[in-house]
Image: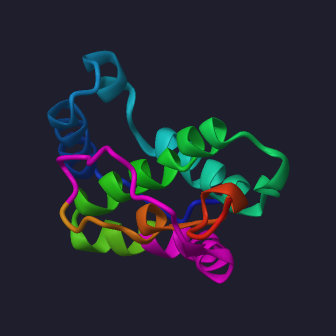
Amino acid sequence: MELGVDLTADDVSSIRQAIRAWGKPPEVAVKYGTASLGEHLSAWKEFVERDWGDWDISEYDHDVGCRTWIQVAVEHSNPATAAQIEAAAKAADSIFRSLMVPARELPSYRVPVLRQHPYFWETHTIHPELAAGAA
């Protein structure tokens, strides 16, 4: 996937520091870079294009986390890089927004290094069983 995102050394350092502050293991933080961001952006695209009607809720709960990782990169990069990341996520974000409905309940976790909870992927869902009013 062509990212169009160039993480600077300062971006990577800041993101890795945020990952450590989040409580992730040091080996996770030290491996984070442009390739990791690319994996999360690709996973987000696959996530929003999947038909969740036949998939388990626990899989959904796990996979939606890729958007959180993207947000960590957005919020802990310099403004120019953050704009590039947001542009790279925009198409998938738009798909999610076009399909989303209010979620039955908000997730119980909060990522402490993020600034603007709740985010749209936390308050809304594209999994039919998680929708407000679903049986």
Quadrant of the rendered image containing residue 88: bottom right
In depth, the one of 78 and 127 nearer the eye is 127
Tell me where residue 84 appears, x and y as whole percent: 43, 71
Q: In the displayed image of the protein, which residue is found farthest to the front?
A: 135
In the picture provided, is 123 more to the left or to the right than 98?
Answer: left
Whether the magenta-drawn stretch holds residue 97 is answered as: yes
Residue depicted at x 40% and y 52%:
68
Tell me where residue 126 appears, x and y as whole percent: 65, 65
Quadrant into which the N terminus falls: bottom right
Residue depicted at x 25% and y 36%:
19
In depth, the one of 107 and 74 nearer the eye is 107
Quadrant of the rendered image containing residue 16: top left
In depth, the one of 118 and 32 nearer the eye is 118
Above or below, 109 against 5 in this view is above
The magenta region covers: 86-114
Whether the magenta-drawn stretch holds residue 15 is answered as: no
Residue 17 visible in the current orientation: yes
Colouring used for the render: rainbow
Above or below, 38 against 99 in this view is above
Residue depicted at x 69% and y 62%:
48
Above or below, 105 against 83 in this view is above
In the picture provided, is 116 more to the left or to the right than 94?
Answer: left
Tell me where residue 93 appears, x and y as whole percent: 56, 73
Quadrant of the rendered image containing residue 106: bottom left
Residue 1 visible in the current orientation: no
Quadrant into which the C terminus falls: bottom right
Please give the count of numbered marks on the rendered protein.
Answer: 0
In the picture provided, is 127 more to the left or to the right than 69?
Answer: right
Above or below, 90 against 68 in this view is below
In the picture provided, is 96 more to the left or to the right than 49?
Answer: left
